[in-house]
Amino acid sequence: MTRRLSDKDIVLQSGALKDETAKRKQAETQLRKALANFNAIFENSPDALMVIDAIDGTILKVNQMVSHLFGYKLSELKGKNFKILFPSPKQRSQDELIKDPQVFGTVFTQEFRRANGAKRFMDMTSAIVTMDHGISILAAFRDISKRVRMEKRLRESRQKHLQIHQMVRLMTDHTSDYIWAKDPEQQFLFVNRKMSEKLLNCDDPQDAIGKTEAFFIDWKKDKRSQKPIEKMNDCSEHVTETPEKPVKYLKEGIIRGKYFVMDIHESPVFDEKRQIIGTVGIGRDITQQTELRKKIQQNKKNNTGAMKSPVNNVVHDFNTLVSEMERMIVMAQSEFPAEKPGGRYLKKALEIAQQSTGIMERFHHYENETLFQGDREGLSKGKERILFVDIEEAGAEVSKQILEHLGYQTRAGSDPEKALTEFRLNPDSFDLVITDMTLPKMSGETLASEILKIRPDIPIIFCTTGYRQPQVDIKSGLTGIAALMIKPLAMSDIAQTVRNVLDKSNPNQ
């Protein structure tokens, strides 16, 4: 028999049903609110969001940012395969086809294709979600094309900076000068290899970076001389702070027990706001020239009877060179077998032998000084302007003094390129050019040829040793070569040859 429910049971069951219905309606309301909130967040997210079927890759849902980022309408993406967003094989190179996406944690950096075919780099973050239709992938996209372009430019800039640095390093490491750059605190930012090895005494130029000059060098005052060295034209006093304008000065002292003088040119470096951010400098070792200049100045004060002292100095210096050269040769033979001599010591011996040329120039200078004192009135003189180029700075200085004793205005040096530049700037400021046949950087013939291109009427005198003959027709006069003087040059020969050439070039004067 079927038991009939009592009225009380019916009321209880009815109340329970109502409670369950109310709870279900409340849950449905909360679910609708949650779905509405999810849709609001999904649609208004600053990132492009996309729901993709995890099985077949079909795009199920997208937000408005997807349309903005990829350039498709929403209806054009729904139901399409996710591969539509990847560049086609025709747009990608072989390397790109086999290259895997870059993974940074849970972020994939990948190249995607817009509707117009343009490619964009994007970061994609994905997560597995379970939805009514099954397992899906929630993907978020963010355009990083601008960042990628900036990173590319930064890499290119760094590469260009590296190439420039390598080029500067290559050029400065093959020069005979000392080159450096400092910050406002006088700490080195750059030094070339000669500066590092010869002056700072460190093998690697990088070892000097971040340190000051005082870390490596203790400039001690030269006690041998009570008087300062002769200042060069437009030279400033010794500079210890960052200069506010280009300066030129001499630095003199004792470094590691040896006398040293450096001719320095230094300039400030400014940023775009005209603030000083450091200095760059270049220095040249002029120790030998300075010592010779000091001796010449001292010898000028001596009378004719005191000329024996300079001659004795020349003999002493020459004997010292010979002894040092012999010592180098002995060291070369003792360190290596006879069939394989030491190249370093032989090279040093050759350098010492080459210095003897300067000593002989000094000897002839003293010889000419004696002649100048004893027979001054018998020499031909003049007031013309002469450009003199010698193979050695010491020889140029001696010849300059001889010509100035004879009354000529003389510009002298050993750098043919500098002499050519000076002549090119003021070709009419010279009446005669005298050049050595053998010069550094360019030959005497080349220098003469370039000068004659600028001013064909300028007379030129060649100087050469007894065994070196110029490859020009001096007698014809067609090349502009007026005369030839054989070295070593005597004062009387210089006076006579120069005067004859100038008189022939200006017969009306």
Image: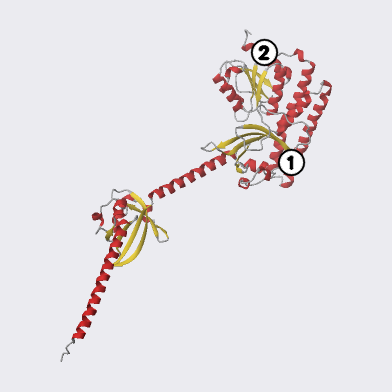
Residue 332 appears in the picture as rendered: yes
Along the line of sight, the residue nearer the viewer: 336 or 419: 419
Taking 434 as reference, is 103 left or right?
A: left
Taking 325 as reference, is 177 left or right?
A: left
Along the line of sight, the residue nearer the viewer: 286 or 464: 286
Name the image quarter holding residue 384. Answer: top right
Q: Quadrant of the N terminus?
A: bottom left
Q: Residues within 10 Å of mark 2 (few under 14, many from 20)?
A: some
In x, y percent, where is residue 8? 21, 85
Name the image quarter holding residue 177. Answer: top right
Earlier sequence position, callout 1 versus callout 2 = 1
Taking 77 as reference, is 99 left or right?
A: right
Q: Amino acid at mark 2?
A: Asn
Name the image quarter holding residue 397. Answer: top right
Which SS class for mark 1?
A: helix
Q: Outermost residue, right direction?
A: 305
Q: Amino acid at mark 1?
A: Met
- Residue 328: give its label: 1
Q: Residue at x 56, y 18 (%)?
A: 455
Give the spatial CA distance, label 1 vs label 2: 46 Å
Along the line of sight, the residue nearer the viewer: 63 or 392: 63
Q: Residue at x 31, y 68 (%)?
A: 130
Tell me if residue 324 comes above or below residue 204 in the rendering.
Answer: above
